[in-house]
Image (tube, rainbow, N blue to C red):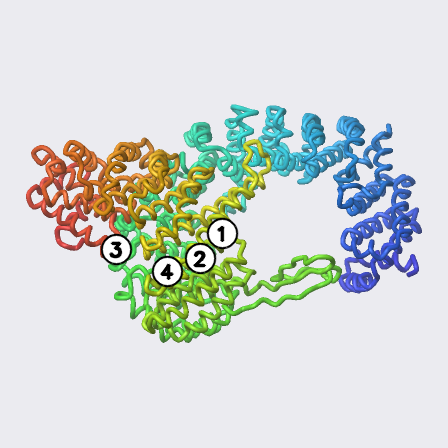
Amino acid sequence: MDVNAFTDLITQLQSSDNEIRKKAEEHYEQIDGPTKVAALFEAYAHHSGNTDVRSTVLVFLRRVLSRDWDAIWEKLNEENRQRILAKVLEMIVHESEISIKKKIADLIAEIASNLIDDTGDMSWKGVLELMDHCLKSDDLTANYIALLILRGCPIVFGTNLAHFLPSLKVVLEKSMATPDLQIKSTAVRAIIAFAVDNDEEKDVVKLMTALVPNVLQVCNETSDEDDSDGPLGEFAELASSIPKCLNPHMQQVLQVVLSLAGNKEKNEMCRQNAIEVICSYMESAPKGLKKHAPGALGPILETLLSCMTEMDDDVLNEWLTEVEDEEDYEDIPIIAESAIDRVACCINGKVMLPVFLPLVEKLLSTEDWKMKHAALRAFSAVGEGCQRSMEPHIEQLMVHITKYVNDTHPRVQYAACNAIGQMSTDFAPTLQKKCHSAVIPALLESLDRTDVPRVCAHAASALVNFAEECPKSIIGQYLPYILQKLENVLSAVFNRLADKRYQMVVENIVTAIASVAEAAEELFKEHHARLIPNLVHILQNVGELKELRGKTIECISLIGYAVGKEHFHATAIEILNLLGDGMKDLAIDDPQYSYMISSWTRFCSILGADFAPFLPVVMDPVLRAARYRPDFNIFNNEDIQDTEEGVEYHGIGGEKTVGIRTSGLEEKATACDMLVAFAKEMKEAFMPYVLDVYELAIKNLEFGLHDGVRTASAEIMPYLLVCVEKQGLDDKRRLWCECLKALTTSMEEEDDVEILAAFMTAIGACIGVMGTEGIAEDEVKLIINILHKQLENYGRRMSDRPAEDEDDDDAEAKEELDYFMELEASCLGAISDLTHSLMKEFKGTIFEGMINVFDCAIQLIEGSKQFFERQWGMCLLDDAIEFGVGHLPSRFPKLIPIMYKLLGDEYPEVRQAASYGFGVMAIRYQEVNDYRTEILNCLEPLAAMIQREDARSTEENTVATENAISAFAKIIGNVPLPPDVYGKIVETYLTWLPTYADTEESPYIYTCLAELFDKQDAALFGPENSNLQRIFLVCLTAIANEAFNDDETGNNTKQRVALILKTIFSTFPQFAQQEGIDEHLQGVLQKVLSGQQ
C-alpha cells in the first residue's frame, strides 16, 4: 500500500465521523498483521518531520503488536524479526523529541515483554544493551527512557537482575531527587512495578524497602496530581502486594498518608489513594500495624472519621428530593466509611473497639449534625468486623443509637435508621432478642416521617432487616402496633405514587409487611384478612410500576405462607387465577419475573396437592428453562473486535477463544430451584412429571457452567423418591439406584468442594427416604467408601495448601485462604451429615465398617489447625457414641481426653459438639453401663463450660451452653447418681434455666424438669418449696420465648410445661405478680391458663 494512502487510512481511523471511521476500520482489519507492521514502520520513517503522525503511528504499532503478537511474530522469518528489533532501537537512539521517545519506549517494553523465554531469560540482547547504556549514562533523559521501559516491562532484565541492580539503584535515587515531577513519577512507577513483578527476588525487595522513604517524598511532592495511577496510587499497590517493604518505615508512611488523607485542600484522588494505602497495608498484613506502628490505630480512625464528617450543607435539598442511595453523595465520606469497614475486618474487635468507641462517642456528643451522622454511619460499618466483640454489649449500644431517630436533622435520622438496619443483620438474632424494646419503637417513630420520604422509606427498610431474623415470640408482642403503623403510612402516601420518592416508600412498606408476616407466622392470622384486600388493590392499580407490583405479589404469597392453607386457600386460588395469564407471557427481563417465580413456588408450598391444576401453567416454561443449553461459538482471537453482552469468552489455547452465551443461565438455575420446590411440596401429585424431571436432573448434574444448576439437580433427588413412595418399593429402588449411580459417578469427576458437599447431602437425604429396607448391602459399603475417600481427599487438599504464615503479606492469598476454609468446612459438615444419616438408619450393623471413618475423626481433631475440624470431627464421634456398639472409649482410648479438652475450646461450636456427646452417653447408659465413669467425671468440666463468662454473650455461645445444660438433663434423667451429687446437680440445674435458644434440646431440658416436678423432687422444690416461684417464672419464660419446636415432641413438652404453670398457679396465684413478669408475660400466662397456648 502506498505510504500516503496508508497514512490517510490511519487518519480516517480517528475520524469523528462514524461512517468514515467504520469504513476505515473495515479496510484496516483486512490488512494482515505483518503487512500492517511493515506499513506502520514505513509511515513512521516517511513522516519524520510530522510529530503528530509519528505519535499516532507508534500508538497503532504498539496496539497491533500487543493484540496479535503471536500471529505476527510466527509469520516473520528470522531476518525480518531482527530487522524490526534493530529498527525500534535505532528509532529511540536517533529520536530527539521527548514525547516520541516515550512512545518508542512503550513500544520497546511491549516487544520485550513478549521475548522472555521459558527459562525467564531475555532473548532480545539488544534491549539489555540499551538498558545497560541508559542506566549507566549520566544523561537524565537516557535514565528516563530506561525507567519508561522498566515500567512497561518489569521483567526486562530476565535472569540478569544482579548485573543491573546497582546501576538501577543509582538511577532511581537520582531520578527521584530531580526537580522534574514527570521523571520523579516515572521512577516511582518503575520501581514499584519492578518490585511487584519480582517480589520473590530478595535483592529486589531489599532495594524497594530501602527506597520507600524516597518514594514517600515523591508521593508528597506529586500529591496534587489527579491521577489514580500516580505515585501514591502505585504506592497503594505496593502496600497491597509487598507490605513487608513498608514495615521498617511504617511510622513515616502513616505520617505522610494520614496527612494527605485528612487534607481537604488536596484533590479527591490523592486523598482516596492515601486512604487506600492504609487499607491495603492492613488487609495484606493485619498484624503489621501492631508490630511496626503500635498506637497508630487511633490516628487512623480519627482521620477516617474526620473524613466522614465532610458533608455539604448545600446538598441537603438535593438529598431530600432525590431517591438515590446515600452513597451517591460526598465521595470522600463514603470512601472513608468503606475504609473503616475494611479496617474493622482486618483488626481483632478486642483491639478495635477500645479505640473506636471513645472516638464515636465524642462525635455523638456534639451538636454538629455532620459529626453525629459520621458516628452513626461508622457504627453501621464496623459491625461485620467487630461482631464477636460488640455483640456482648449490643443492648447498651442500641439504646444509645436509637435515640438519634429523633434528631432534628433528617440525615442524622436516616443514618440512625441505617445503623439499626445494618446492625440488625450483623448481630442477628441476638440484637432482636435483646434490643427489641429499643429498636421497634424507634423504627415505628421514624415511619411517621412521611414529610421526609427517604427517612420513612429507610425506616421501613431497617424494619425489614430487623424482622428477617426476629423470633416469632418477639415480633408477636408488637404485631398490632407494627401493622397499624405500616397501614397508616401506606394510606397516607399511596395517592402520591407519581412522586418517585413515595414509590420507594410504598415499595419498602410492602416489603416490610412481607417480612413481618414471615417472622410472625401463624400469629399473622388475625390481621391477614384486613391486609390482603389492600394489597390486591395495589396489585390491580399500580399500572406500569412493575417493581412495586412484583413486591406486592411477593408480599401476598409470604402472608399466605405465614397463615397457612386453612386460612389462605381461597385467596391463593383467586390470586393464581388473577396472575395465570401474565405468567405465561412474562419476559425474563421483566422486573416482576423473579418475584413472580418465587411467589408461585410459595403458592405451591401453601396449597400442596391443590396446586396441581396450576402446574400445567408453569411446568412447560419451567421445564423449557431448566433444559436450556447455552449456544457457543469458537472464534479466532483476531476476529473478536467487540465483546457481545450476555456472552462469556474463554481462551482455549493458541489463537482460539470460545464464546458461551450465558444470558439464559440464571433463568435455568431458577427453574431448577422451582422444580425442587414443586417436587418437595407436591409429593405424589407431582408424579406425572417425575420421569421427565429425573432424567433432566441426571443430565444437569454434569452441567458445569452454573453451580446452582448442579446443586439443585442433586437436591431434588430425595424429593423425587418421596413422589413415587406410593408406587411401591420396587419403583423407589429403581429410582434410587439410578440416583446413587449418577451422584457417585459425578463425585468421581467433580473437583468443586461446594458441589461435592451438595452431592453428599443429597445422598444423606435419600437414605432417610429409603430406610434400611430400601438400601442394599453393597450400596451401604459404597457410601461408606465415599465417606472414607472424601475424608482422605479433604486431608490431601489441606496438606497441599501452603501453611498460613503470619508474616505472609499477600492479601489476595489470605482472602483466598479464608474462602477455601469456608468451603472445606461445608464439605466436612456434609461428610458429618451423611455419616449421621447412615448411622441413624443402620446403627450398630455397620459400626465395624465405619471404624476407619471414626479413626479419621480422631486424627482430624488431634491434628486440627481449624476450629471446624474439631467441630465436625467431634460430630462424627458423636454419631459413633449415639449409634455405635458398646463402650466407645474402650475402642478409642483417646476419645474421652479429647472430649474433656474440647469442652473448654475457644469456639462454641466445638464445645457444643463435645457436650452433646456426653449427653448421648447418658441416654445410652441403660444399654452401656460402662459409661458411668465418664459421665461422673464430665460433670465438673460441663458445669465449667456452662458457667463461662461468655456463656451467653452471643447466639453461638448460648446454643452451646444450652447443649451442655441438656447434657445435664439427660444425666439427671438416665444415670443413677450419688445422693449428694444428685441434690447439688438438680439445684444448680434449676439456676441455669430458662433456656430457649436451642429448640432441638428443649424437649430434653424441660422433660427433665417436668419429671422432677411430677415426682415432687425435694432438690428441685427446695426447702419449704422455696423454688416453686422460680420454676413458675422459668416455665412461663420458656413458653413466651418459644423454646419448643412446632412438632409432636415439641408440643408434647410444651404441654407438660404449661401443666406445671397451671398447677403452681392454682395454689400460688400471687406468683404471677412477681418481679420479672411484665405485661407481655402476663398475656402469655392468660393464654396458657385459658388453654390457648
Q: Is residue 943 left or right of residue 581?
A: left
Residue type, numbered disc 1: Val
Q: Is residue 214 above or below residue 520?
A: above
Residue type, numbered disc 2: Gln
Of mark 3 and mark 2, the one earlier in the sequence is 2
Of mark 3 and mark 4, the one earlier in the sequence is 4
Q: Are marks 3 and 2 in contact (CB under 8 Å)?
A: no
Q: Are marks 1 and 3 in contact (CB under 8 Å)?
A: no
Report the front residue among 437 and 780: 780
Q: Which quarter shows the N terminus? A: bottom right
Q: Are marks 2 and 4 in contact (CB under 8 Å)?
A: no
Report the front residue among 163 and 332: 163
Observer-side mark, 1 or 4, equals 4
Of mark 2 and mark 4, the one earlier in the sequence is 2
Residue type, numbered disc 3: Asp
Report the front residue among 688 and 773: 773
Q: Looking at the picture, how far across and down is residue 501, in whole percent?
A: 46, 54
Of mark 1 and mark 3, the one earlier in the sequence is 1
Residue occupied by mark 3: 1046
Image quadrant in which you'd find residue 728: bottom left
Describe the element under mark 2 as helix, strand or loop: helix
Q: Is residue 472 above or below residue 600?
A: above
Q: Residue at x 46, y 28 (%)?
A: 355
Q: Looking at the picture, how far across and down is residue 544, in whole percent?
A: 47, 66
